[in-house]
């Protein structure tokens, strides 16, 4: 992972002591516990890794070292790294967040020419302010206000979602933003304005639309959705894709819904902005929406940070059902469970909750079926729906059973698998054994073609080099024992050489190394692994000196072999002085060897 220090140059500007102080102000176990559940095991805490999908916990947090490491995906770091990864924020942002929580003030300064992406959020924020002002005060926005009130939105809700209005003009937002000091090119980059076809100048992208700011999970305005008031098209216009606005990565309303999602343990996914807003207003606050695009794996990852279950709502028309079925693959192999909620025909969440209220909607949520049940029931119903005497009935049965099996074979839990096979057997009146053998046949066919699943890297047997480095990482005081007994070249593994370089040549502790930019991520991850592993030694000092000796011995053996080779070469005609010098060297090495092996 690349550490982006953005426009907040901590490096060299904020002293390391302050970063250390900020880092030390928060306990890593406490910070991580706010996001995932951790259990105490031995000296460490373990939980399910939020950075990769897993069923058995391999995410370890060491309260002693204030380090985390995942043995599944090899990600590790300290509390700053955790926040960076978990919240998708930069190093300076993570430090600021921690400082803020701890009440520590840090002076912020900007460096010229390095603006990062922050300006995009600034332009968007100013534009959102402008649209909001227009909606609440401008005379021209009256139809928009009436439209929203007619759709049942309260003033409170408009405020909460910062709903605005873009005037039906070519330069309303443009003029406002100019006055606020924004540059034309930045407005274009943020997608608030678009370059004129003539190539010079620009004009407002959104005109005569209700404006819905779309925020990321940190409440920063990433872009907008704009809806027309009448039936003209396009009904919705979104911001163009920008470095901060990506429809496949953002969910509408997540900023407002995330706490509630965490509390209830599940998220409700809807398709429209107005659905999100209407449900929130009705008191169902764990609701998010896609931005007019299909649900993606990135959306799932985003939700996975907050919950382990998602209720997907779809229209009950064929298009809605197909959309539900397409979503199924995204949830394969994910620990997030998906349920499918089909709304009564003709309703969307907005109209449904408007007519029937919160309790009725929650009852629908309660009755939502698991996505696999949903899909299998659908297939069975469809096949059964055809008249048995119809010519295609056997064909459709075979095809239907095949479709069901292709869903079932992706399930890893055997009991679950068996349950579904029984259901298909009953549904189609096909013997269970026949289905099972079909399933096995499918698997065998697959085996021949597909490469075997890549084996998880086996944990390497701890060797002297690794044990030694682990000890040094875990106990700073032990470093002086090494002194100049060892050199970086004594380590055979290039990764270990680099780590040894950090540990033996500098005074920095593991956190400073983790926070530094010079050290690459792979090295950092290996170091965090060494920091949290559960090796136990009765006497770390004794173990350390054993390891040092082991490394010294192999160095001596190597030198000894070399000198012997040189001697044989020199004896073949080198000057006698040279041979003598080498023999003395050999003698000295032998002496050293004796000392090493005797002690
Ligand atoms: Zn992991």
Image: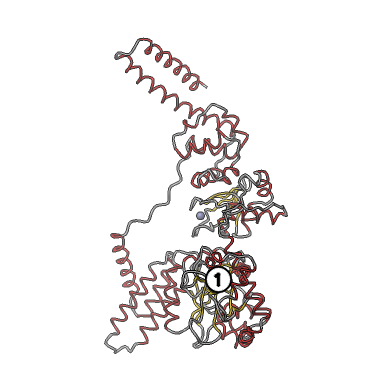
What x and y, as percent, mark residue 589?
A: 45, 18
Pointer 1 local density, CA inside 10 Å: few below 14, some 14–19, many at least 20 = many
Which sits in the foreground, 529 or 12?
12
What x and y, as percent, mark residue 278?
A: 60, 81
Above or below, comparing residue 70 to residue 369 in the picture: above
What x and y, as percent, mark residue 26?
A: 67, 52
**How many numbered discs?**
1
Which sits in the foreground, 578 or 138?
138
What x and y, as percent, mark residue 447?
A: 31, 60
Above or below, comparing residue 43 to residue 299 in the picture: above
Indicate yes or no: mark 1 CB to ligand 1 under 8 Å.
no
Give the residue displayed 60% in from the left and 46% down from the top.
Answer: 11
Above or below, comparing residue 122 to residue 213 in the picture: above
Give the residue displayed 40% in from the left and 15% down from the top.
Answer: 582
**View extreme (top): residue:** 576
- Identify the secondary structure beneath mark 1: loop
Q: How are the residues colored? A: secondary structure
Residue that carries the numbered disc 1 in the rendered image: 192
The answer to whether residue 128 is left or right of residue 247 is right
Q: Quadrant of residue 141 in the image?
A: bottom right
The answer to whether residue 103 is left or right of residue 587 is right
């Amino acid at each position: 992972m690349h550490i982006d220090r953005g426009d907040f140059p901590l490096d060299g500007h904020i002293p390391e002591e302050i970063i250390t102080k900020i880092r030390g102000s928060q306990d890593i176990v406490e910070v991580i516990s706010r996001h995932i559940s951790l259990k105490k095991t031995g000296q460490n805490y373990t939980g399910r890794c939020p950075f990769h999908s897993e069923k058995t916990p391999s995410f370890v947090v060491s309260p002693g070292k204030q380090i985390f490491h995942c043995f599944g995906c090899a990600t590790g770091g300290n509390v700053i790294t955790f926040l960076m990864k978990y919240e998708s924020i930069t190093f300076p942002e993570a430090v600021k967040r921690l400082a803020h929580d701890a009440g520590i003030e840090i002076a912020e300064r900007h460096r010229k020419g390095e603006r990062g992406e922050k300006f995009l959020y600034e332009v968007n924020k100013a534009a959102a302010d402008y649209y909001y002002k227009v909606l609440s005060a401008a005379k021209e926005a009256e139809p928009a206000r009436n439209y929203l009130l007619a759709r049942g939105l309260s003033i409170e809700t408009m405020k909460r979602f910062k709903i605005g209005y873009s005037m039906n003009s070519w330069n309303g937002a443009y003029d406002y933003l100019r006055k606020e000091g924004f540059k034309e090119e930045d407005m274009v980059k943020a997608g608030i304005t678009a370059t004129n076809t003539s190539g010079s100048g620009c004009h407002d992208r959104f005109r005569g639309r209700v404006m819905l700011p779309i925020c990321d999970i940190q409440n920063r305005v990433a872009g907008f959705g704009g809806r027309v008031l009448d039936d003209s098209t396009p009904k919705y216009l979104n911001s163009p894709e920008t470095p901060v606005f990506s429809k496949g990565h953002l969910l509408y309303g997540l900023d407002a819904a995330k706490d509630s999602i965490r509390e209830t343990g599940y998220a409700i996914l809807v398709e429209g902005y107005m659905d999100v807003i209407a449900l929130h207003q009705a008191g169902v606050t764990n609701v998010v929406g896609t931005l007019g695009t299909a649900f993606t794996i990135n959306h799932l990852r985003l939700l996975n940070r907050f919950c382990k279950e998602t209720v997907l709502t779809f229209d009950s028309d064929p298009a809605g059902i197909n959309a539900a079925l397409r979503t199924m693959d995204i949830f394969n192999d994910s620990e997030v469970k998906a349920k499918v909620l089909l709304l009564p025909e003709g309703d969307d969440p907005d109209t449904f909750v408007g007519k029937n209220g919160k309790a009725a909607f929650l009852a629908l949520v309660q009755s939502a079926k698991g996505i696999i049940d949903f899909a299998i029931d659908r297939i069975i119903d469809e096949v059964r729906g055809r008249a048995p005497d119809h010519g295609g009935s056997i064909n459709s049965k075979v095809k239907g059973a095949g479709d069901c099996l292709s869903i079932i074979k992706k399930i890893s839990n055997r009991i679950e698998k068996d349950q579904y096979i029984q259901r298909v057997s009953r549904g189609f009146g096909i013997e269970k054994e026949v289905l099972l053998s079909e399933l096995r046949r499918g698997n065998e066919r697959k085996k021949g073609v597909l490469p075997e699943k890549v084996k998880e890297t086996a944990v390497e047997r701890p060797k002297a080099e690794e044990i030694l480095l682990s000890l040094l990482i875990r106990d700073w005081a032990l470093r002086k024992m090494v002194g100049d007994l060892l050199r970086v070249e004594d380590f055979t593994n290039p990764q270990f050489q680099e780590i040894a370089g950090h540990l033996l040549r500098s005074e920095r502790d593991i956190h400073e190394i983790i926070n530094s930019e010079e050290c690459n991520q792979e090295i950092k991850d290996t170091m965090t692994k060494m920091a949290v592993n559960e090796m136990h030694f009765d006497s770390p000092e004794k173990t350390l000196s054993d390891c040092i000796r082991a490394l010294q011995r192999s160095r001596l053996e190597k030198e000894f072999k070399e000198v012997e080779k040189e001697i044989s070469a020199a004896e073949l005609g080198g000057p006698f002085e040279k041979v003598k010098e080498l023999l003395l060297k050999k003698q000295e090495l032998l002496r050293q060897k004796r000392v090493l092996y005797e002690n």
